[in-house]
Amino acid sequence: MDLFDDLPEPTQTSAQVPTAPKSASKEAAEEGRLKRKREDDECDGKPGEEEIKKVCKEGLPVLKGYVAVRRGEREEMQDAHVLHPDMSGCLPALPQQVSRLSYFAVFDGHGGARASRYAAENLHHNLAKKFPSGEMDNLDKLVKKCLLDTFRQTDDDFLKKASSQKPAWKDGSTATCMLVVDDLVYVANLGDSRAVLCRMEETEAAGGQRKSVTLALSKEHNPTIYEERMRIQKAGGTVRDGRVLGVLEVSRSIGDGQYKRCGVISTPDLRRCQLTTNDKFIILACDGLFKVFSADEAVKYVLDVLQSPSPLQQETSVEQKPALTDEELRFESACQQLASEAVRRGCADNVTVILVSIGF
């Protein structure tokens, strides 16, 4: 099984972002990185560096995140989420060819909320520490390795903390994390939370109308999938009623220390996709949404709200944010309504939806 699945190439390629030329010396490169870290607009007089900085950022997608949370019928909210449209400042340094990093994640806890909260608080910090820096020719490979190492460390650290408690914590959590490196999307996921991309493509119909295409950016992990069941059985575990040992619904997770010896792992599947001008938005959500929505239905629901006339009248929470533009109001309304509709359709589980708009 290939962990590094790339999505199909887009039918219309977006404008390519020029790669910054190498600095004349290591000293100049270090100064460039320090300038980016300080986020200081002051020019230090070195020819070419300010121009390079502007060229790198030209044509990058603008990402904005919106979140909606519903508790459903659960006594406790066990979901957690993180939105960092620009997390470049969290890193000590960026690779020379990278101008911006964005990070969005949703975590769905089970057996308690401690694993999901721990992952939300710590995973992106581990990612920032491990993210590659300096000059390199194999950035893609290093980013993928960074994500794998980050998930492993976050899981190990939580399991150590959980086992040191009396009684030991038995919490676990799914994870769907989206890291955007300039215009490249990397999604790392464990369990049954999901990420889907809405891409608009032209049809052959007259008038140049465009239709939406839903692209899966994640892969579900449950014990009924052949490869997952084989791994669990080889480790000495069993699958009963579609669950590990008849209890756990997912076959990969952060935490769940009591199931790690039964083949439950924290190795995420990784998928990569280049954003194009045809891309509209990405939905990251826990399984509470997808129990009552298919991926296509969720995308079409959001599109209907975005195209509706009066976002201000559709959701009370949107009225409390007058500083938003009309487009931002529509995305905020779409996110809130999607989560509310999941509860209305009978989802008793916690529901967390992150809607990421994509603009060029």
Image: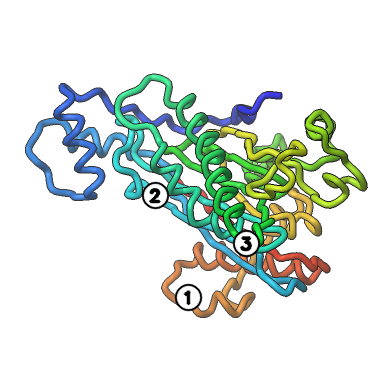
Give the SS element for disc 2. Answer: loop
Q: CA distance from mark 1 to mark 2?
A: 24 Å
Q: Is residue 77 left or right of residue 26?
A: right
Q: Amino acid at mark 1?
A: Lys
Where on the picture, by quarter, is residue 21?
A: top left
In which quadrant of the rendered image does the C terminus lie? top left
Residue at the image position 59 percent from the left and 48 percent from the top = 159
Q: CA distance from mark 3 to mark 2?
A: 36 Å
Q: Nearer the viewer, residue 324 or 28?
A: 28
User: Along the polypeptide, which appears first: circle 3 or circle 2?
Assistant: 2
Q: Which residue is mark 2?
A: 87
Q: Which residue is mark 1?
A: 321
On the question of residue 251 being in view, the answer is: yes
Residue 93 drawn at (x, y percent): 29, 39
Nearer the observer, disc 3 or disc 1? 3
Q: Nearer the viewer, residue 273 or 358?
A: 273
Q: Which mark is residue 310?
A: none
Q: Nearer the viewer, residue 119 or 9?
A: 119
User: Along the polypeptide, which appears first: circle 3 or circle 1?
Assistant: 3
Instruction: Give neighbour class at mark 1: few <14, some 14-19, many 20+ (Cα, 10 Å).
Output: few
Q: Amino acid at mark 2?
A: Met
Give the SS element for disc 1. Answer: loop
Nearer the observer, disc 1 or disc 2? 2
Residue 112, above or below 297: below
Residue 350, above or below 150: below
Residue 118, above or below 231: below
Residue at the image position 19 percent from the left and 33 percent from the top = 30
On the question of residue 303 being in view, the answer is: no
Residue 120 drawn at (x, y percent): 53, 56
In which quadrant of the rendered image does the N terminus lie? top right
Q: Which residue is mark 3?
A: 166
